[in-house]
Image (cartoon, rainbow, N blue to C red):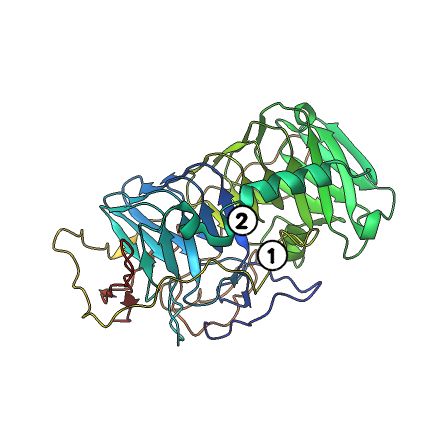
Amino acid sequence: MATGQSASCPAPGKTPGIGHAPSFTDNNVALFAGGDYTADGGTAEAEGLLVVKGDASFAKSGGGVFNVGRVGAGSGILPASGNVMLAVGGGLSVGKGTTVDVGHGLTAGPRYGGSVQVGGKLDDQGELETNGGSLTQGMGQKGALGPYAAFDTTLGKESSSLGSLKTTGTAERSGASVTFTSTGAGKDGLQVFEISAADLDGASTFSFRSIPAGASVVVNVTGSQAVRISPMSVGFNDDRVDLYSSANFGEAASRILYNFEKSPSLTLGGGGNFMGSILAPEASADITASTNGRLYFGKDVRTHGSGNESHNYPWNGSPAFACGTGTTVPPAPAPSTQPAESARPDQPAKPDTEPSATPSAPSQPEGTTEPAQPERPSESAGQPAAGPSASSPAPREDTGLLATTGAGPTTLIAVAAAAVLAAGGALFAVARRRRRT
């Protein structure tokens, strides 16, 4: 577990906003792709446990770093050091010039970095860095995914159950804006809204009003139409919560879930902040916006924006999707005492800096007066930003290294490789630890 990381989940009402330090432990799935997962273009990071039932491919345009598990600036809610942070049922490929950095900066021991489990084979033309965590391949789909091998079945059951709930409020579309207003207490405080996929399609501004204190929200999206959303502004009880400066950023992100029970595809366009979790058991996804919540898709997922990130904010409305410290993909087999493996001679050198991929501030939809989304807080590889801007919260204290992010240029950490082999047939584990230079 990293320095400053609690072994527990956030207390009710205490979900953190965006910061640099790992603060809480969560071993539940943050992002699930029931098909294949592709990260290309200028996409930057995926916080928390990433589970892919099919194949996973990382190939950033022009090369660069894609962070998994620990990110440069996020919720700080992530698996403990050394736990599995990337589980792939099929094959895993890393394109030339791309570095997949798993568990960066988690160096407080006795376990380090983030571990990777692969059902098939690793095609590593770039670099897969586990920072001291283990790498195991050839496990088969069930072995690699462990308790999450049938997670897509859980998604379908949860989606159907939530979709059957009686509404406790109204949904109204006007222009590009959708307003959800509570009119009742709801079952166990859960606020339920319903809107058709046709009415949600094309929306960019979202407002939640009169939501009772502490209540979680589910938006049931009906119909089998594909939906495209380009988030520009999100309000929650009269606070614009998609701004990093909002004191309620983390709270809003952890209280909202959109349930796309029958939608075949979902596009999150633009470069703004989507607030809340997504449950879409029948859908594929195309993502260029940054997201703040669980992402659960039954089919293929592609993320390919400019510096866009997924931040792990568990949804508090269902135990299946809440923060959990007990469930984890089983760790890789114990390493043998074989000597450390040197870096492969054909391995491309890690770049000294990561190009800036900061998304431009989105414009506001017609009829709104809120300011545009600010740039992300900057981070460096060795320390937090020198000082918070007027639009970003002060980063949480962190004694570890910061993950490189697509949000700004950073200095990468040099690598000292250490690899070990695991006993057990076709399986092997390789552990590498990154040191400061």
- The mark tally for this picture is 2
**Left or right position of 336 against 42:** left
In the figure, 339 relative to 370: above or below? below
Amino acid at dot 1: Ser
Residue 175 or 126: which is nearer the viewer?
A: 126
Secondary structure, mark 2, is loop
Residue 310 or 386: which is nearer the viewer?
A: 310
**In x, y percent, where is residue 190?**
78, 49
**Left or right position of 265 against 222:** left
In the figure, 212 relative to 170: above or below? below
**Left or right position of 225 against 150:** right
**Outermost residue, right direction?**
184
Residue shown at 57% from the left, 55% from the top? 391
Q: Which residue is mark 1?
A: 245
Residue shown at 71% from the left, 33% from the top? 178
- In this orientation, does residue 232 appear? no
Residue shown at 67% from the left, 23% from the top? 198
**In x, y percent, where is residue 239?**
71, 50
Q: Of the numbered discs in the image, which one, if any, rests on residue 374? A: 2
Residue 358 or 434: which is nearer the viewer?
A: 434
Q: Residues within 10 Å of mark 1 (few under 14, many from 20)?
A: some
Q: Of the numbered discs in the image, which one, if any, rests on residue 162? A: none
Residue shown at 69% from the left, 37% from the top? 160
Amino acid at dot 2: Pro
Quadrant hosting residue 337: bottom left
- In this orientation, does residue 179 appear? yes
Secondary structure, mark 1, is loop
